[in-house]
Structure formats: structure tokens, C-alpha cells
Image (cartoon, rainbow, N blue to C red):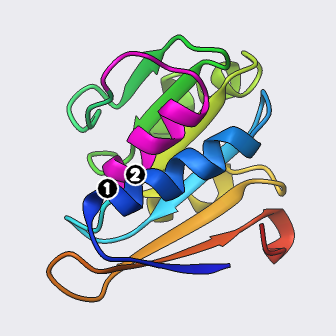
Amino acid sequence: MIIITNNENETVLEGEKLGKLLTPGAVVALHGGLGAGKTAFVRGLAVGLGVSESVSSPTFTIVNEYPGNIPLFHFDMYRLNTENELFDIGWDDYLERGGVCAVEWSEKVPSAFPPDAVMVKIEILGENKRSIDICAGGGHTV
């Protein structure tokens, strides 16, 4: 499903819509360049999952954890050099904790995701305009 948003609030809203559909154990792999809106989308995911805390980019911490109706584990792979570094921080454990794992810069760790991961590709179309392509595991449209 391809969605066009015209501002950051619309991008957040699309993330919220997806968050309301996710179940414990879901993995969301986000792909997009700097400033594409990945963190804004994850802020919406958090709202959809019932997270009340403010979500920020985990670029320097690699992962931020947020309690909610369904916990959110927000990863940022930007600073990782190898997939092994993801496993070193306990990726397998996070997958088993019953939350939703949202991973920014997912293209850096492509083989780490389960086959049913939701893929979200965000492209910049203009100053505030974005294209968001959401595919469920196996390339199925959400």
C-alpha cells in the first residue's frame, strides 16, 4: 500500500494507523534516507500501541524501550557496522519479549528480520511530502 503524506502530522497519523493493527511480536523494518520521516512514523506507531511516553530517535543508544498496551522497542541501526552488532545487543531476546520491534535503517541488517516483518519504505517527494510504502511479510499489502 502506498500512501502520500503532505506533512509530518500526516506521517505520524499513518504510523498510528499501522500501530493499531500490530500484535505482540511484530517487527516493523523502516527504510528511508536522512530526514525521510522514519522517527515521525514510529512516533505514530507508539500512539497506536498505547505508548504514552514521547518517542525520540535512538541513534546514539541503538534501542529505546517504551512501555504501553504493547511495548515498543525502537531500534536505530544507523551507527552499526555489521549485523552481528545487532545480535550482540540482544536482538533475539527483543523478538521474544512480546512487544513490537520498530527498526530504523533496516537496510543495514536485512537478514535479521523474520519473514513476516512489515516493511515500511519512506521516500522524500518534496519539502514536507512523503511516499510511504507499507508491505506485510512476504510482500503482501497491509
| Residue lying farthest to the top in this orientation | 67
Q: Do the residues labelled 1 and 2 touch (CB within 8 Å)?
A: yes
Eyeballing the image, is 130 above or below 74? below
Give the extent of the magenta segment. 38-54
Q: Quadrant of residue 140?
A: bottom right
Left or right, 29 with respect to 10, comes to: right
Q: Give percent across and percent down for residue 57.
A: 26, 37
Residue at the (64%, 64%) spot, across then down: 119
- Residue position for label 2: 12
Q: Could you tell me the amino acid type at mark 2?
A: Val
Residue at the (28%, 80%) spot, across then down: 129
Q: Could you tell me the amino acid type at mark 1?
A: Asn
Residue at the (28%, 68%) spot, across then down: 36
Q: Give percent across and percent down for residue 91.
A: 60, 29
Query: In front here: 16 or 66?
Result: 16
Query: In front here: 111 or 75?
Result: 75
Residue at the (27%, 60%) spot, across then down: 8
Q: In which quarter of the image is residue 37?
A: bottom left
Residue 51 counted in the magenta span: yes
Query: In front here: 80 or 40?
Result: 40
- Residue 9 got which mark? 1
Does the rendering let one see residue 71? yes
For numbered disc 1, what is the local secondary structure?
A: helix
Eyeballing the image, is 67 above or below 131? above
